[in-house]
């Protein structure tokens, strides 16, 4: 039995901001599962049992188990949480409209930059030895 | 010196534009004519020469007058040009290099020149270095004509032995004619895509993209941004600041953003156009507001201009600017400027020479 205050939906949602979608991370522009719109619902009962329904961006998402176990760990570490039940909402069909507007724009800008910029500006400064300093 | 800033021009040369120097092929005839057309197209009104004055064999001494009596140039980097398939003497002969080296060693830094498509080019380079032991660089062209043949800077068999020899001989930089395709030939050899392979393989050698930004701006900007030993040499590009300001601004802004001011080398290509209008334009130059905003660039500072005019070149080559400055103090050109109260009008000395020596 925990003695701390019961968890809030807002606190749980905030904690889930840190969980990123593995595919977006692989493209070097990580987006959280909250911003992607994958956290479909969060409920807390009077026994402080937290239930989270998660969607995926595609029906064949191989990363669902990874995402679900990360969500369970992150939420169970929050004060006041007795137990976490993560479920896969298979009825949810994801498209870009599920995303947070700001996150959608950030990702679009990032991908555009990634596509047109094989190098960063003045990358030569970062780690290359110049002939005169050799 | 302009406004106290030392001016080191990274590319100057005394062309031999006399008709007798033109090789007997159509590319050579077209290019020869084109040099005059370009001069007319881009020259500032006060520095525009008529055909019979321009299309001559410019002497080494005439070049010194253009640079040091008529412009704020302090030191020039003189390139031997080996455009052998267009011009019988290559266009800027080794003999002119030798004369400049022997007569005005403190006013010039010397680049040697070879045609990499010719047999014995390595021996040629060794011979030139023996005669000008203080030479610091090599100038090369990526193609020749009649018959047409091209080569790449990242070619391990053809190019890398040249770079290895440069290092052995103590040459610190290789200047590639790029971007401006010589008339009537494929453009591919003038692309920038071979410089990275050379720069990667020879990190202790510098590479200059000559005419940087006159074409292939984005790629050029990325290459100078990515490699510490690749620099943008602004020969002819800088002229566009006077003759085509918007074209210059867009190229300059992109190279400034991607490469940084430290990767840009002031150069004019004088005597092809006169240096002084270019120096005066760059001495106060600022990008248009829309391009500063686009790239998030701050206004150019005096420190930036000092880097552009000489500091970058000096750093690239390990030169001491104070030493260069002391080397020309009180020399014949310094004295001439002092006794004449400043600079003479553009090409006034050449006009005088031509009046005394009618065209042969």
Image (tube, rainbow, N blue to C red):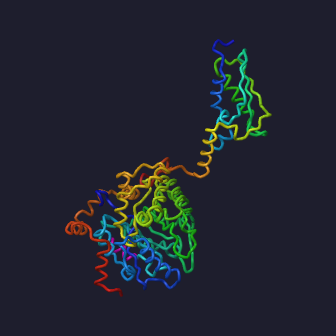
Residue B190: quarter of image: bottom right
Locate the N terminus of chain B by quadrant. bottom left
Would residue B200 be found to the left or right of residue B66 on screen?
Answer: right
- Residue B99, image x, y percentages: 33, 75
Residue B197 point in image, percent of width and height: 55, 60
Above/below status of B232 relative to B83: above
Image-quadrant location for residue B59: bottom left
Q: Determine the residue positioned at 80% across, 34% down.
A: A91
Q: Which residues are magenta?
A: B93-101
Residue B64, visible in the rendered structure: no
- Please give left or right for residue B156 compared with residue B264 in the image: right
Q: Position of residue B204 (x, y in %)?
A: 47, 57
Residue B352 relative to residue B152: left or right: left
Can residue B329 be seen in this snapshot?
yes
Q: Is residue B100 magenta?
A: yes
Residue A10: image quadrant is top right
User: Which residue is outermost to the left?
Assistant: B339
Compared with B17, B211 (above or below) is above
**Magenta span has B173?**
no
| Residue farthest toward the right in the current orientation of the protein | A91
Please say if B114 is above or below A88. Answer: below
Question: Residue most toward the bottom?
Answer: B360
Task: Give percent across and percent down for residue B218.
Answer: 54, 58
Judge by depth and name the residue closer to the eye, B176 or B359. Answer: B359
- Report the front residue among A108 and B92: A108
Q: Identify whether B310 is placed above or below B65.
A: above
Please tell me whether the stretch drawn in magenta is mainly helix, strand or loop. Answer: helix
- Residue at 54%, 62% in the rendered image: B216
Near-viewer residue (A104 or B228): A104
Q: Is residue A81 left or right of residue B206?
A: right
């Amino acid at each position: 039995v925990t003695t701390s205050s019961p968890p809030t939906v807002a606190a749980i949602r905030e904690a889930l901001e840190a969980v990123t979608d593995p595919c977006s991370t692989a493209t070097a522009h990580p987006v959280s599962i909250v911003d992607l719109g994958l956290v479909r619902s969060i409920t807390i009962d009077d026994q402080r049992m937290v239930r989270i329904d998660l969607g995926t961006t595609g029906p064949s998402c191989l990363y669902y188990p990874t995402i679900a176990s990360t969500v369970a760990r992150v939420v169970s570490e929050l004060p006041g949480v007795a137990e976490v039940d993560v479920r896969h909402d298979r009825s949810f069909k994801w498209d870009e409209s599920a995303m947070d507007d700001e996150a959608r724009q950030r990702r679009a800008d990032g991908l555009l930059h990634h596509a047109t910029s094989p190098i960063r500006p003045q990358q030569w400064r970062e780690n290359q030895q110049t002939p005169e300093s050799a | 010196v302009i406004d106290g800033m030392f001016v080191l021009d990274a590319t100057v040369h005394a062309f031999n534009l006399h008709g007798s120097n033109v090789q007997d092929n159509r590319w050579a005839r077209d290019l020869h004519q084109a040099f005059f057309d370009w001069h007319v197209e881009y020259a500032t009104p006060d520095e525009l020469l008529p055909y019979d004055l321009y299309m001559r064999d410019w002497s080494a001494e005439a070049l010194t007058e253009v640079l040091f009596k008529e412009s704020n140039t302090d030191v020039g980097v003189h390139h031997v040009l080996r455009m052998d398939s267009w011009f019988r003497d290559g266009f800027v002969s080794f003999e002119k290099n030798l004369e400049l080296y022997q007569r005005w060693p403190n006013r010039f830094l010397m680049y040697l020149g070879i045609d990499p498509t010719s047999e014995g080019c390595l021996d040629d380079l060794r011979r030139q270095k023996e005669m000008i032991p203080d030479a610091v660089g090599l100038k090369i062209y990526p193609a020749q004509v009649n018959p047409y043949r091209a080569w790449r800077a990242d070619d391990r068999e053809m190019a890398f032995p040249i770079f290895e020899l440069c290092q052995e001989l103590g040459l610190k930089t290789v200047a590639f004619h790029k971007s401006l395709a010589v008339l009537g030939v494929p453009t591919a050899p003038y692309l920038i895509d071979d410089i990275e392979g050379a720069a990667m393989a020879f990190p202790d050698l510098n590479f200059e993209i000559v005419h940087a930004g006159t074409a292939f701006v984005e790629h050029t900007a990325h290459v100078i941004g990515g490699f510490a030993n690749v620099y943008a040499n602004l020969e002819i590009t800088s002229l566009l600041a006077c003759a085509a300001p918007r074209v210059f601004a867009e190229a300059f802004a992109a190279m400034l953003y991607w490469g940084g001011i430290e990767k840009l080398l002031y150069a004019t290509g004088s005597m092809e156009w006169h240096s002084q209008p270019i120096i005066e334009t760059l001495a106060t130059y600022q990008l248009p507001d829309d391009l500063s905003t686009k790239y998030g660039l701050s206004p150019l500072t005096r420190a930036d201009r000092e880097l552009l005019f000489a500091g970058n070149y000096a750093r690239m080559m390990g030169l001491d600017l104070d030493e260069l400055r002391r080397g020309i103090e009180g020399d014949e050109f310094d004295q001439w400027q002092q006794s004449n109260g400043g600079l003479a009008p553009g090409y006034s000395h050449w006009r005088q020479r031509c009046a005394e020596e009618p065209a042969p």
